[in-house]
Image (cartoon, coloured by chain):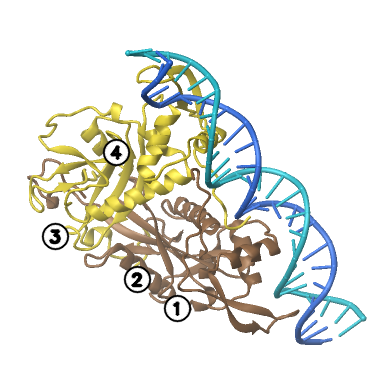
Chain colours: A brown, B yellow, C cyan, D blue
Amino acid sequence: MGHNMPENYDATKFERPSVTVDVVIFSLVDNDLQVLLVKRKYPPFAGVWAIPGGFVRMEESLEDAAVRELAEETGVTDVYIEQLYTFGAPHRDPRTRVITVAYFALVPHDAIQHRPGDDAAETAWFSMFDLPELAFDHAQILSYALQRLRYKLEYTAVGFELLPDAFTLSELQHAYEIILGEQLDKRNFRRKILSSEVLEETGRKKKEGEGRPAMLYRYRKDAVAEVKTRRLFP
Amino acid sequence: MGHNMPENYDATKFERPSVTVDVVIFSLVDNDLQVLLVKRKYPPFAGVWAIPGGFVRMEESLEDAAVRELAEETGVTDVYIEQLYTFGAPHRDPRTRVITVAYFALVPHDAIQHRPGDDAAETAWFSMFDLPELAFDHAQILSYALQRLRYKLEYTAVGFELLPDAFTLSELQHAYEIILGEQLDKRNFRRKILSSEVLEETGRKKKEGEGRPAMLYRYRKDAVAEVKTRRLFP
DNA sequence: ACAAAAGTGTTGAGAGTACACCCATGC
DNA sequence: GCATGGGTGTACTCTCAACACTTTTGT
């Protein structure tokens, strides 16, 4: 804040916008990067798909609101969530001024509980690469979220936030390939991810499926997530 | 937004927070990275320094509000400005719920017009490395802004947004050294910045000062600002 | 034994880093 | 002519990128 305009009037005299949080919930489903959307039941945009979200309550922080929305939609807590951007064009909601703080979350698909008709809202997963028509400016928000996710994948190790607790390197590589939309070299991928020392072996092997069983890895909770970027200056 | 909670009540029924924008205004003054602060005249935190900001008006976008605040404080338009983060802890303002969308701006010092007692608010420049006590959570916002500025310097070329239209490579290097807080090698710096092709020679030379006159450069407006980072994966 | 996926090394190219001297100008 | 800052090149190291075969298991 700042409030250093002629300050003898107080905040309550200003007309206030509504503030919501929207949570872009990513998961890997069926070898695809998908996002959870809800079908709106009331105008505006009744029957149109939208990013889950809701009003920020007076006694909760923005991140608490985002975590609450995420839990309401997926039953999941304790997953990766990060503030994305705040969208506040004056007429992005045709009814009234609504400013939304967008978050994005990475949820392992196996952690999601189906909540059938939770508050009777229809929800569904959609491929990020084949989206329906979206309410408000939500197409823009999703586009920005994908950009940010890809960007983060390139210099951090958030990929396994989308995988179960234990996973094989092939599964991890596959996740990266789906999100980045390109093939990666297996040997270079393994060398790079292992040398970054964010993973550790579980000792167990994945027995299902054909072929040779693969070592299962887990994320090292003590690892530093950020990988040094190529700096423009030394 | 999203508004897909039981939606038969409308937004106007929700208690709404106030929304402000705060603008962290960076400039290089006297071989130092400085930030513009305003002294608050009214409680809470009367007499304490704070980041300039103000309420978002109903008919302006968030960025418009930030640009307006910046212009009110410095008289400057057309400078680098970027959304930083949105801060919304419930009691960050003790009076009432205030959510602030923080921006940061890079302003060349020679562009700033002194606006003596513009709205009679006392403003002053402070070194980022020697800050006074600050109102609200503004210390946290400044800390985050510095982190982001340094980070951006490392992989983009925003440095010259703090310099006049034409500048020498030594001046640019000096700016980087001040902000990053470390010495850089002159030959490597020059090679790197020139090979990134974001600058072009003006043809003119800087004649003031002692020693050999230095070539003046300008930013190439057609240049791509982003420099490729070291990717974790190919 | 064969199908399927896991796992493993090397080489060449390009970028990063460290480092010391000559050049143009004003006084 | 000397003080001041401007401007330049090279060698070593490290990371990146491209590339193909062997191993382990189930059937």
Does mark 1 fall on the same chain as mark 3? no
Residue beneath disc 2 = A68
Does mark 2 fall on the same chain as mark 1? yes
Q: CA distance from mark 4 to mark 1?
A: 56 Å
**Going 27% across and 40% down the picture, which residue do you hit?**
B34
Q: Compared to B76, does A222 lie above or below?
A: below
Q: CA distance from mark 2 to mark 3?
A: 24 Å
Which of these two is toward me, B160 or A143? B160
Badge nearest the viewer, 1 or 2? 2
**Chain under numbered label 1:** A
Q: Compared to A178, does B76 lie above or below?
A: above
Does mark 1 fall on the same chain as mark 4? no
Residue beneath disc 4 = B32
**Chain under numbered label 2:** A
Is residue A87 among the parts visible in the rendering?
no
Q: Are marks 2 and 4 in contact (CB under 8 Å)?
A: no
**Going 50% across and 74% down the picture, which residue do you hit?**
A220
Residue beneath disc 1 = A115
Badge nearest the viewer, 2 or 3? 3
Does mark 3 fall on the same chain as mark 2? no
Q: Earlier in the sequence, mark 1 or mark 2?
A: 2
Residue A73 shown left or right of residue B102 in the figure? right
Dot 2 amino acid type: Arg
Secondary element under disc 1, as helix, strand or loop, is: loop
Badge nearest the viewer, 3 or 4? 4
Dot 4 amino acid type: Asp
Badge nearest the viewer, 4 or 1? 4
**Classed neighbour count for the residue bearing mark 3: other residues with Cα under 10 Å, few (<14), some (14–19), many (≥20):** few
**Chain under numbered label 3:** B
Residue beneath disc 3 = B94
Does mark 4 fall on the same chain as mark 3? yes
